[in-house]
Amino acid sequence: MVLLQFLRRHSLAVVIVTSLLLLVLAIFTSQPRERMSFLEGFVGEVVSPVQKVIYRVASYIYGSIADIKERRNLRESYQQLSERVEQLEKELLRMNELEKQNQRLKKLLDFAVEREELVVTGARVTAKDPGNWFNVFTIDKGKNQGVEINMAVVTDRGLVGRIIEVGPNWAKVRSIVDAQSSISGIVERTRDNGIVKGNNAFGTEDGTCRMVYLSLDSEVNVGDKVITSGLGDFLPKGIYIGEVIEVVRYKKDLYKTAVIKPGVDFQRLEEVLVVKARYDE
């Protein structure tokens, strides 16, 4: 009991004295001799297990520190790789978008080359009215680029509509599917003339058009192509409008009506061409 109290009170001194004794003993036993004394053997038997424990503990601590450092390095590498992957994904998305845009612009260019009698200028859609359909939308060309009211707007897939309002560097377009749109058309096969009106009114939008005032003896059928007639309005003749998907006659009407699916996708417009003039005018 007295010994324990002494050790507790003088623990630091005991540690220092013991360390010095071990150091002296280590120096003494390190000298080359043929035989080991009894004391040296006894101390060796006592110290050896302690040394093993200390070695294992030290090895474990070193390994843990090395593992923590390695994990930290892995986390940093993972963070760097994650940021790089994110950058590459953004770059890939941008490249894909540019590729799609180039494909769309190439189609518009091909259309302009095929219709070389038309003077056209390219424009980008910058805004549209609320809803899924491009009934009325805004483009980034206006008076400063020679755009005027009633000019036709097209894509490589057909007629889009006409200019209804013009600013210095912008213009508004009313598409052919809008309920307020009305243009003259002709059935390519039968040469029947009629008025093509938009079906997209509030609450009844379906993206189609109606060709009205077709004579009762008209032979228009499903699958017939409808183009602009060029009669009495602003549109050049021969621009594709769409395909007949239904022919009906309402009881109160004295004419047939053809329902037309436009060639243009009026839910996904991004670039258009404005027809500014004709070379033969």
Image: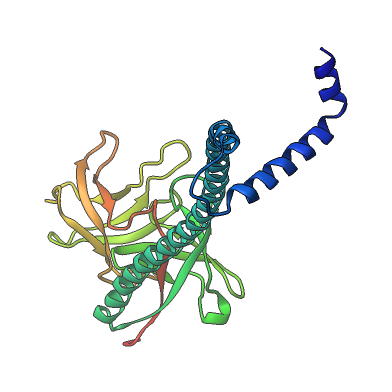
Q: 90 above or below 146?
A: above
- Give how far across and how far down residue 277 sits, in percent: 39, 81
- Give how far across and how far down residue 265 sits, in percent: 33, 54
Q: Residue at x 55, y 74 (%)?
A: 142
Q: Residue furthest top?
A: 1
- Give how far across and how far down residue 257 sits, in percent: 25, 45
Q: Residue furthest right?
A: 9
Q: Residue furthest bottom?
A: 280
**In the shown orientation, is residue 89 left or right of residue 52?**
left
The answer to which of 98 and 166 lies nearer the viewer is 98
Q: 50 above or below 64?
A: above
Q: Residue at x 82, y 24 (%)?
A: 7
The answer to which of 249 and 245 lies nearer the viewer is 245
Q: Looking at the figure, which quarter contains the C terminus?
A: bottom left
The answer to which of 223 and 87 lies nearer the viewer is 87
| Coloring applied to the structure | rainbow
**For residue 47, which quarter of the picture?**
top right
Q: 172 above or below 141?
A: above
**In the shown orientation, is residue 205 left or right of residue 129?**
left
The answer to which of 278 and 268 lies nearer the viewer is 268
Total marks in image? 0
Q: Looking at the figure, which quarter contains the N terminus?
A: top right
**For residue 206, which quarter of the picture?**
top left
